[in-house]
Image (spheres, rainbow, N blue to C red):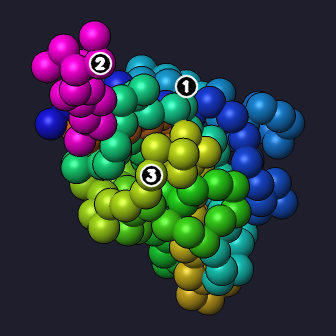
Amino acid sequence: MATLTQLVLNGDGTIDTTNLSHDAGTGSPWYTHCNDAPDGGSSDFVQCNGSLISGSYIAWFSLSDVDADFESMLTLNIDCDIIASGFVNDSCNLNARIADGDDSTTWLTDQVTLGSQSVTTRDQRNRTFGSLTGTKAQWNTAHLRLTWFYTKQTSPDPAASLRIFGLDIDGTYTAASAAAPNSMALLGVGR
């Protein structure tokens, strides 16, 4: 077992720029608005907009590469920094899942809920991904999907927002075995 070099967001994928926004609007890049350390200190964020109807609103972000000797993922956790505000009677869950590329459905993890409209005090939390799979090549093209699952109850909640300020991903992996030395050479055969 080896400790995974921390995975961080390093680029934008497909993003719903109509129903999501960041602290500076909707311009690129987006990933710089939610890739800070999840320690409660950042003022950058990505959020769902207010007055939404029921639906799923998605942002994809590319992840940094796994370690050079990576063979398979053993454990994986996501740390995040979130807060919700302005919800009256609507509800929203922010979920995360990792696939092998932008807008892919070849999943490398299961889906975890990072938080909901009930997180009204800024909170740093840790969630564990399960159902880990994938090769080194798949992990090196991996993208994190953040999904705001929004449910509108009656009239719109115009000030509703569920913000993520920062995140990082830690874990452990199985390292690829070093190539076995040529046993014939060790015995001096062929000399």
Q: Amino acid at mark 2?
A: Gly
What percent of the width, then of the height, locates residue 54?
65, 83
Pointer 1: what residue? 43
Nearer the observer: mark 2 or 1; the answer is 2
What percent of the width, then of the height, locates residue 63?
55, 38
Q: Is residue 36 above or below residue 151?
A: above
Find out whether residue 142 is within the magenta segment. Answer: no
**Marks 3,2: beta carbons within 8 A:** no
Find out whether residue 178 is within the magenta segment. Answer: yes
Secondary structure beneath dot 2 equals: loop
Quadrant holding the N terminus: top left
What percent of the width, then of the height, locates residue 167?
44, 36
Pointer 2: what residue? 190
Q: CA distance from mark 2 to mark 1?
A: 67 Å
Say which quarter of the image contains residue 123: top left
What percent of the width, then of the height, locates residue 6?
37, 28
Q: Amino acid at mark 3?
A: Thr
Residue at 25% x, 54% y is 128
Residue at 76% x, 54% y is 14
Residue at 28% x, 10% y is 191
Inspect this view and state whether residue 18 appears. yes
In the displayed structure image, the side of residue 67 where residue 161 appears, left or right? right
